[in-house]
Amino acid sequence: MRHRIAVVALEGVVPFDLGTPTQVFGVRDRSGHRYYDVGVCTPGGTPVRTTGGYSVVPEYGLELLDEVETVVVAGVHWRVAFGGGPTEVHAALRAAARRARVMSICTGAFVLAAAGLLDHRPATTHWAFADEFRRRHPRVRLDPNVLFVDDGDVLTSAGVAAGIDLCLHVVRRDHGSEVANRVARQCVVPPWRDGGQSQFIERPLPPPGDSTTAATRAWALDRLDQPLTLDQLAQHARMSVRTFTRRFRDETGLSPGRWLALQRVEHARRLLETTDLPIDRVAAQSGLGTAASLRQRLRATVGVSPGAYRRTFRAGATGAR
């Protein structure tokens, strides 16, 4: 049976936040197979108004939460968010959280917090509402600077496009990088942004004709197996190190070194999933040096050894330790 997902829409739901999980999790593979079954539910199964000036008519009521493996609370208007949502939703979420994975997008975190599901946990929400969130929910370990937080069975994202990043992260966690990248291509979005990336990306799209680091990033991705220094990257971009570093951070939200380290780990994950290369060869081809370094980086990123990661995403793979 396919993994079942319930998307909870409350009065004042944000259309983008509601559409994100239904779109990302609703993508099919080349043969038409769906990876997930997704349903939208509301309290009582009644229509709810969106912030976009129209209403949504759901197929289900909150009883859907009793039948699924993942629950996603979509973002809502700040007035609804600050109130925490209906108490009947809190009870349904608490019951679901005892056996299912629970997620929120943007201000949906206020609803999870009001239900008590984020107490003493790390979480995030849209940076614009961070102060109000801290005031109302001081027991939550809020980090308003990241795109999303994966705390195992409870996951939260920042606003708008960060919800896409979180949903793709979940697809990657469930099915591996190859499937997640395929889903991203079908959604025409970047395949991967690390959850720890800053929400504050000042210039994700440089003005036409302006200098950009995009070509250098593409160049670096083709050379992950080679040592790459900041001087080399800046030289390729035909910029000073200072200018390159500033523009790189403006465009990606990360320093060049942090970005490069994350790309190396992501490449190693793809090699583990799609090849039978020995662990030391995977480490070398991804530019991480030694098998010990790969083990350390992968444990820090996904919490498992290379061998365990390969066994998870390549059934029957042998020879990895």
Image (spheres, rainbow, N blue to C red):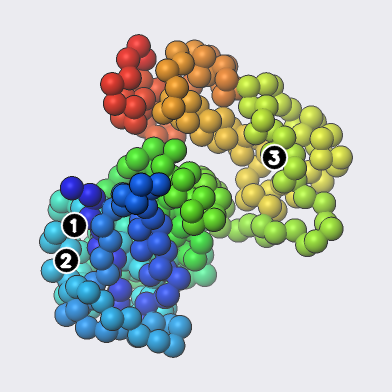
Q: Quadrant of residue 261?
A: top right
> Residue at position x 39%, y 55% from top?
27
- Dots 1 and 3: beta carbons under 8 Å? no
x, y percentage for residue 59? 22, 74
- Dots 1 and 2: beta carbons under 8 Å? yes
Q: Which mark is residue 64?
A: 2
Residue density around tag 2, few if under 14, some if 14–19, many if 20 or more, within 10 Å: many
- The amino acid type found where label 2 is placed reads Leu
| Sequence-first disc among 3 and 2 | 2
Horizontal side of residue 136 vs 58, given as left or right: right
Residue placed under numbered mark 1 in the picture: 68
Whether residue 138 can be seen here: no
For marks 1 and 2, give the CA distance.
7 Å
Residue 274 sits above or below residue 249 on the image: above
Question: Which residue extends farthest bottom?
Answer: 53
In what element is the residue under mark 2?
A: helix
Residue placed under numbered mark 3 in the picture: 217
Residue density around tag 1, few if under 14, some if 14–19, many if 20 or more, within 10 Å: some
For marks 1 and 3, give the CA distance.
40 Å
Horizontal side of residue 187 vs 319, given as left or right: right
x, y percentage for residue 244? 79, 43
